[in-house]
Image (cartoon, rainbow, N blue to C red):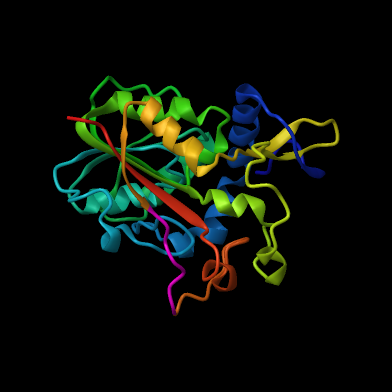
Amino acid sequence: MYPVSTPTEATRRPVAAAETATANRTWWDGEATSYYVEHGAFLGDTDFVWGPERLREEDAALLGDPAGQDVLEIGAGSGQCSRWLAAHGARVVATDLSAGMVATGVAVNDAVDEPARVPFAQCDGRALPFADASFDTVFTAYGVVPFVADSDVVMAEAARVLRPGGRFVFSTTHPVRWAFPDDPGPGGLTARHSYFDREPYVEQDAEGHATYVEHHRTLGDRVREITAAGLVLVDLVEPEWPEGHDEPWGGWSPLRGRIIPGTAVFVCRKPA
């Protein structure tokens, strides 16, 4: 299964929330199987990495002790992070906007041992179908945040479903990377765009309809979104590319990762 519209042009232009959601839902539906085939070995079915640098939750412990926690993952993809948490004693619900990704996650569930299996729900991270104060932790590893036009709404929804004292942790492309081409080689070390240019990256078909969209925010924008949602930023983790990790991921690579940051992990807390 592939996207209905094949992108013929990459550009930067304004894209509203509805067009973004339609484009990205369709793209992830079409790419779910091939994405898992391409990246499944890197991500693992029951592992938890925060990004291409392979920062593991097992080492970083950004979510605290999983045992006994009620956890919500938004933008879960095939659910590997949720399975890792479930295997370590958390009660987890994995969600994704894409029906294709949810179907892939359900299929992967059948291939893993019972303690790691998690329930899936298809939903939009901007409109979570859960009651207020339902979870101890909400998180997303490269899901939702860069793929919506109104990420401030995602922050507000995460805050709403969190219990007082709970954590919201999300990883996304480091805003500095927006200024550089998505090139893992030397060409990706020269800034070509303004860091302050917030026009999203758009792939579109011959009729000009968006087929894939990523939105950019500066570090300051992210901090303002977090605080406007009533959350407190307690840490900003910028993983360094580790020695011995030589596997590139798209524009991420050992060459670039040891010079400029590729990932930002925002650790937030809802006041008690």
* Quadrant location of the N terminus in the rendered image: top right
Q: Quadrant of residue 237?
A: bottom left
From the top left corner, tell me how far across and down residue 110 is, in percent. 36, 50
Question: Is 218 situated above or below 88?
Answer: above
Q: Quadrant of residue 243?
A: bottom left
Specify start and end residues of the magenta stretch as a single range.
237-243
Please state the horizontal and vertical placement of residue 42, each as a whole percent of the image: 47, 64
- Does 240 appear in magenta? yes
Closer to the camera, 48 or 266?
Answer: 266
In the displayed structure, would residue 102 be above or below residue 238?
Answer: above
In the image, farthest residue toward the right:
206
On the rendered structure, is 33 left or right of 73? Answer: right
* Numbered marks: total: 0
Residue at point 68% right, 64% down? 188
Q: Quadrant of the C terminus?
A: top left
Residue 120 lies, in percent from the top left, at 37, 36
Whether residue 125 is visible = no
**Residue at the image position 44 percent from the left and 29 percent from the top:** 154
Percent of width and height locating residue 92: 27, 40
Magenta: main secondary structure equals loop
Which residue corresponds to the image point at 68% horizontal and 70% vertical from the top-left?
185
In front of the other: 257 or 21: 257
